[in-house]
Image: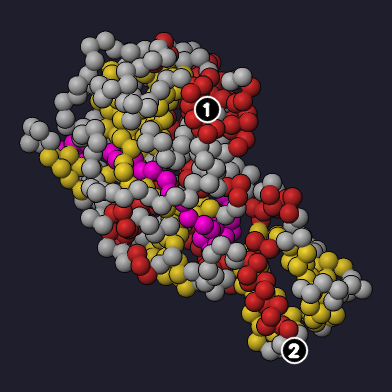
Amino acid sequence: MTMTASPWALPATVQGKAACLRISDRALEVVVDKSTWLHIPIELVLDVTWTSPTLSIAVLAPRRHLCHAPRILSRAQWTERHKNAAELEPFTFKAQHADEKGAEWAAHVMQLAYPRTQPQRRILIICNPFGGKGHAKKMLDDVVMPTFRVARCTVHVVETKKRGDAYRYCESLDVSQYDALACVGGDGTLHESLNGLACRTDAAHALTLPVVPVPAGSGNGLFVSLHGTAVGFSAAHACLSAIKGVTYTHELMSVTQPQDAFTSANSCPYTLHGVGPDGRSYVQYYSFMSQAIGIIADVDIGTESWRFIGDARFELGYVLSVLRNRSCPITVEVCFGPSGTTSRADMYHAAKKTPERIQESPPHVEDAHQLLRGSVLDPLPTADVPLRPSETAHPPTDDTWTRLDVSVSSVYAGKVPFVSRGLMAFPYTCPSDGLLDVLIQDQHTSALQKISATLHGETGDHIFDRGMHYFKVHALRITPHPDTPRRFLSVDGETVPYAPIQVEVSPLRITLLTLSDDEWSAPSIRAHTIQAHASRYP
Ligand SMILES: Nc1ncnc2c1ncn2[C@@H]1O[C@H](COP(=O)(O)OP(=O)(O)OP(=O)(O)O)[C@@H](O)[C@H]1O
């Protein structure tokens, strides 16, 4: 037996049997009685301690369905995010090794397991126990807490009791006390937590606290954008990124709406206000993912009572909304500015060029809440001639705003690629290009064409469908026509007043954590998107 051939192989006793603990090919392997009992990539080792004569080893390993089945995950499976990875669970075992080599071995494995970061992070958890299908609390108790516990993280848990709690908690949080903020819930909990941090006077500093989405909602757009679709809604995966992820930053969007649109029925927790030129007040808040009106918002908000069917509610709701075929009477104005574009080829090439490792620190921000394009209450310097987005390759490049000549079925704008597992709404979005991506569905396309667009949503190919306009802008204003039926308007999947709204990219950036090299290019430029669209742009 080659038990001690490698310097990092350690003879030991596991469950009373002779065993060998070894590191080979960046994997931790435990061989008991000559058969492999555990084999996992070193990234999945959470903690190793030696207190003579006992080694305690905590890992995330594939769930063991059979009593004697080994826990094996190959590096290829891990890299591919094989479905086994979605079933990782925290698992601690003990091995006996009496001499001092145990301490040396433990220290060495910990160095390999944490090559870029320090172990034992201090983690704040904000949990919406009713998130998604109501599974958030179970996810917290069954996976999140056990995983952080075995990784010997210090954890503080805050459970929200009502809407606005996460916002208020983050508004006064001492961010220096934590290394990461894990939000267990849906995108709504993230929206509130990020707004609590972003609306502070020290927003740029507060947003250096890395935020980790733990997917207990139905859409979980940020989680899917970060980790891809293959891992499913894996809480273990999210915990791993909180425990050892490296930081990078991602632009936020500023949103303004008239303050008088917020009634007591849809009161908002947002505390940031400003005054427009006519003396009226506006509310300013932030969006990390998307804004929607028309069919998409009807699906997002109008199907909330169907949460029990999970993310299938989005597909079903979409088909029903298309069949109803209601128009969306709104005015859409955009500012293309110096780098906005309607050319998908330009967007594709820019996305391809975006550096793969987006780790830079956020730029210095003088005025965190500055609105570069003004608020929703400012009169717009709009060009006389409305623009059909599909018919021009050269939109105005100055600061003029342009009214779009398009009959709208829905407008969807955003800054992360996936808004749910089944929809990569914004395939060419970039984390730091200063632009938001806008997708407009034309009302004049047939119901069949609209439904067929959903078939291409997973790969981002819907942007090439007839009746879809896709472009990048510096700012967007949507004004619902007065005296028309009220529909839904959603920001990050949350309902906001059906009233004028203006969005621009903020100078503020959020801090996210990412696990491995192939994810450093996320959330915007996932290699497979770029490869999938390569044949369209020879
Ligand atoms: N304890 C609570 N009781 C009621 N509402 C809450 C509570 N905690 C948070 N909320 C609100 O519930 C809304 C939805 O939260 P969240 O996004 O976490 O879950 P979800 O909506 O089920 O997920 P998804 O948005 O992905 O569908 C948010 O507006 C949030 O402010």
Residue at image position (57%, 47%) is 519
Please name whichever residue, 391 or 279, is drawn nearer the observer in this view of the structure: 391
Residue flagged by tag 2: what amino acid is it?
Asp
- Image location (x, y in percent) of residue 163: 32, 53
Give the camera-side residue of 247 and 86: 247
Location of mark 2 (residue): 99
Q: Secondary structure at mark 1?
A: helix
| Residue 351, horizontal then vertical, whole percent | 51, 32
- Residue 472 has which mark? none
Residue 209, placed above or below residue 352: below
Which percent across, then down, holds residue 187? 43, 47
Helix, strand or loop at label 2? It is loop
Dot placed on the residue nearer the N-terminal end, 2 or 1 = 2
Left or right of 120, for residue 473: left
On screen, residue 330 above or below 39: above
Residue type, mark 1 in image = His
Residue at x 65% of width, y 87% of height: 51
* Quadrant of image for the C terminus: top right
Q: Quadrant of residue 301?
A: top left
Determine if residue 268 is in view. Answer: no
* Residue at image point 23% right, 43% down: 370
Is residue 23 or residue 407 the one in the foreground?
Answer: 23
The vertical placement of 41 against 295, above or below, is below
